[in-house]
Image (cartoon, grey):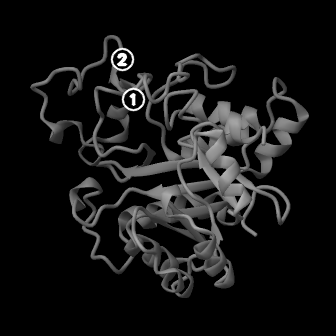
Amino acid sequence: MVSGAAAGSIDIQGHRGARGIQPENTLPAFETALDLGVTTLELDLHFTADDRVVVWHDPIIDASKCGLAAGAEGPDPDDPLTPDEDLMIANLPVAELGNYVCDRNPDKARFPDQEAIPTSLAGSDYRITTLDDLFDFVATYATDASKTAEQREAALGVLFNIETKRKPDSPQAIGDGFDGTTAGPFELAILEVVGGRDLVDRVTIQSFDHRSLWAVHAANPDLRLAALTSRQAPDLEEYATRGASIWSPNQADVTPERIEEAHGLGLLVIPWTINEVNDMKNLLDIGVDGLITDRPDLALTL
């Protein structure tokens, strides 16, 4: 079983770190998730103009989440006249991403408990981080004396569920010339970071763009793959045949029959994004193998 704990246990994945508690995909969010004891850190990946893999969900730096740091220069997301093209991750080098602070709550009604409260290790570092830096941060956490022995031990084995943010109808979002079949520079850069740190056994690659998954599988069949789906009838047999080991559907698409079919094909079922305790209980009752949630604090109490 793909799990951060023993086989047969439930995989609690902190969505974008712990989006319900801290600003998403930031080091404080990941630290919060680690403090809580998640088995997996779930995160999104984009590709910069200078070919670096960074942890971020959106193709642009959006004013609802980010602003220029005090005294920094660059395209201003708060200026309505700034073209979206100037704020695209794919059009900016990684050094310029350091000019932005992403500590804003984009939807206070949806995330009433999200606050940018500095954490003990990450502090108030709400910049867009690289995948390299995130791995470094988790390694540092695992040896930090301010964390409990249990927290350090869990961080040593925490898994990473990392999403390639490709979109078939928006190739400019990554902008690396992906041909739809062979791993593009984006996938190859991810594989280089993961392989260079000997983390293949702790990483799952997920994507809604299944072409990205099959390209990764051709380049490195040892990496686990998760087929993300939303409001569609899944082709579970294809996912299993082409190398996936996890089906991650919108929670509304999960049924006992589909779970049974997936398990029969050797696929785990880990739906997204489940934030209400009753929904968590219902899904666990019908046999899902894990939960992707903005509120790992709630999920871990079940």
- The one nearer the camera, 262 or 218, is 262
The residue at which mark 2 appears reads as 69
Instruction: Tell me, for residue 98, which label it has, or none.
Output: 1
Q: Kindly identify the residue that appears in the image at 44 percent across and 22 percent down.
A: 103
Q: Amino acid at mark 2?
A: Ala
Return the x and y of residue 221 as percentages of the image width and height.
58, 80
Left or right placement of residue 186 versus residue 126 in this view: left
Q: Kindly identify the residue that appears in the image at 52 percent across and 65 percent down.
A: 191
Dots 2, 1 in contact, CB < 8 A: yes
| Helix, strand or loop for disc 2 | loop
- The one nearer the camera, 55 or 270, is 270
Return the x and y of residue 109 as percentages of the image width and height.
43, 24
Left or right placement of residue 8 versus residue 233 in this view: right
Please tell me whether residue 299 is drawn above or below residue 256 in the rendered image: above
Return the x and y of residue 77 as percentages of the image width and height.
23, 26
| Helix, strand or loop for disc 1 | loop
Left or right placement of residue 263 versus residue 21 in this view: right
- The one nearer the camera, 116 or 45, is 116
Q: Residues within 10 Å of mark 2 (few under 14, many from 20)?
A: some
> Looking at the image, is mark 2 or mark 1 earlier in the sequence?
2
Q: Kindly identify the residue that appears in the image at 35 percent across and 70 percent down.
A: 184
Please tell me whether residue 125 is drawn above or below residue 278 in the rendered image: above
Tell how many labels.
Answer: 2
Q: Kindly identify the residue that appears in the image at 55 percent across and 22 percent down.
A: 113
The answer, for residue 173, to whether it is visible in the render is: yes
